[in-house]
Amino acid sequence: ELIFPKDVSEELIKTSANFRSKNRIPTLTYFYQKNQTSLSRCSQPLAGISRSRSKEDEELIEYFRKNSQSEKFIIYDCRPMTNAYGN
């Protein structure tokens, strides 16, 4: 089961998936009800050397940020530093 903020359209999800490696879209992975914090995951974007961006992918991430109950919204990149800078 994939969980998204309620106002996210299916079209936005599909477009965002096309911008992610192996179509792995951002989705809720864990929700801690006690303090209303969440953990979401996705694969790396396919920006590459051209530095292309996806307005739809950024919009989907923004939905996650807006629906976060935490004061902070942190994005971690778990790739090795060299890979992250190269991509």
Image (cartoon, grey):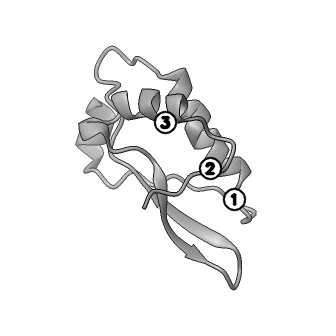
- CB under 8 Å between callouts 2 and 1? yes
Residue, x 40% and y 44% (percent of image)? 25
Residue, x 71% and y 54% (percent of image)? 67
Q: CA separation, marks 3 and 1?
A: 18 Å
Task: Using the image as rendered, state which of residue 7 and residue 86 is in the foreground.
Answer: 7
60 in relation to 6, above or below? above
Which is more N-terminal, label 1 or label 3? Answer: 3
How many labels, in total? Answer: 3
Task: Using the image as rendered, state which of residue 1 and residue 84 is in the foreground.
Answer: 1
Task: Using the image as rendered, state which of residue 49 and residue 37 is in the foreground.
Answer: 37
* Drawn side of residue 80 relative to residue 15, left or right: left
Q: CA separation, marks 2 and 1?
A: 6 Å
Which is more N-terminal, label 2 or label 3? Answer: 3
Task: Using the image as rendered, state which of residue 83 and residue 65 is in the foreground.
Answer: 65
Dividing the picture into quadrants, the one containing residue 38 is bottom right
Q: Residue 68's mark?
A: 1
Element carrying mark 2: helix
> Could you tell me the amino acid type at mark 1?
Ser
Element carrying mark 1: loop
Q: Position of residue 44 (x, y in %)?
A: 33, 41
The quadrant the N terminus occupies is bottom left
* Drawn side of residue 24 relative to residue 66, left or right: left
Q: Position of residue 69 (x, y in %)?
A: 74, 64
73 in relation to 45, above or below? below
Residue, x 25% and y 50% (percent of image)? 80
20 in relation to 36, above or below? above
Q: Which residue is mark 3?
A: 13
> Could you tell me the amino acid type at mark 2?
Phe
Q: Which residue is mark 2?
A: 64
